[in-house]
Image (tube, rainbow, N blue to C red):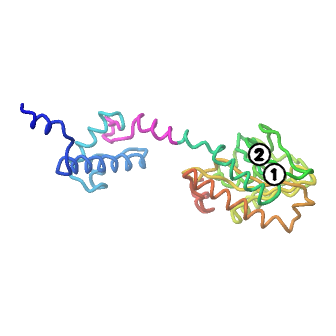
Amino acid sequence: MSEVKRRSAGRPPGPGKSTSGHSQSLVRGLNLLERLAATPGGLALSELADTVDLAPSTTHRLLQALQSQGFITQDAELGVWKVDVKTFRIGNSFLEARDFVATSRPFLRRLTAQSGETANLGIRDGGTAVFLAQSESPQMMRMITRLGSRAPLHASGVGKALMAWLPDDEFERVLAEQGLSRVTENTLHTPEALRAGMAEVRRLGYACDREEHAIGLHCVAACIHDQHGTPLAAISVSGPVARIPESRLADLGELVRETAAEITARLGGKVPTAEAVREKA
């Protein structure tokens, strides 16, 4: 082979048919993978071909390529194609990279700066809310929650914000397993009162704790949702009733709701409608 030929052989493909063909195949393969990921039960070859508007022969060739790399598998008994373990690992790595605690910290600090009060982040663990992060108020008299401490879902702002967006069956299961202990005289301690309270949370987009967990303390909280619209965590602003009277709850509630929506969007999540929550049940 001459020097000129050797150089030509080592060059990457130009902007001709080979490059565009590879790009087109990649896009088509990713489209197939996306359709399968959206259909946990799997799809037959003919269904997939119709969905992506490709010939069955082309679809089958792309499916075999994805299968050879471990992204999808074929259920021989049902004759359908499904996503395989490698696709799960890639999706899981994305979820692991979304450290919602780290993502939320600057928003908690901003809430404290805007409200002058302590901001918290918590998650649900069974029938309790667990506090994971906090931005303390600069005020001498302030609300401080020990990280890792717990509060009943039905008797805390963070807990109510999380509980309100659970599907009905999950809500009823938590209710049956945990009961409604009366923490203070203001705690919602009957199923009827709690259900009405949860409907109000969904309508407003935020929850209020009016001395329901501790006398002299008011709190507003809103839910952070994952990509499926299910509760991931909740943030809150808490402080003494003297600085957060009833007249201030609505304004703080809107502030917390908007902040929770920002965090949800940053994490790639979506805020569901109240109707969508009911449909999940």
Percent x, y of residue 148:
77, 37
In front here: 119 or 159?
Answer: 119
Label 1 amino acid?
Thr
x 46%, y 35%: residue? 89
In front here: 92 or 273?
Answer: 92
Label number found at residue 217: none
Percent x, y of residue 252:
78, 63
Tag 1's secondary structure?
Answer: strand
Q: Residue furthest left?
A: 1
Q: Residue furthest top?
A: 1
Disc 1 or 2, which lies upstream in sequence? Answer: 1
Residues drawn in magenta: 72-94
Label number found at residue 134: 2
Label 2 amino acid?
Gln
Q: Does the magenta stretch include residue 84?
A: yes
Identify the residue under disc 1: 118
Question: Is residue 86 toward the left or the right of residue 228 in the image?
Answer: left
In front here: 25 or 130?
Answer: 25
Q: Is residue 59 magenta?
A: no
x 63%, y 45%: residue? 100
Question: Is residue 187 toward the left or the right of residue 267 in the image?
Answer: right
Report crowding for label 2: few under 14, some 14 to 19, many 20 or more residues within 10 A (C-alpha).
Answer: many
Q: In this view, does 276 lie above or below 152?
A: below
Question: Is residue 205 toward the left or the right of residue 34 in the image?
Answer: right
**Do the residues bearing badges 1 and 2 touch, measured as CB atoms within 8 Å?**
yes
In front here: 92 or 279?
Answer: 92
Q: Distance between the residues labelled 1 and 2?
A: 7 Å
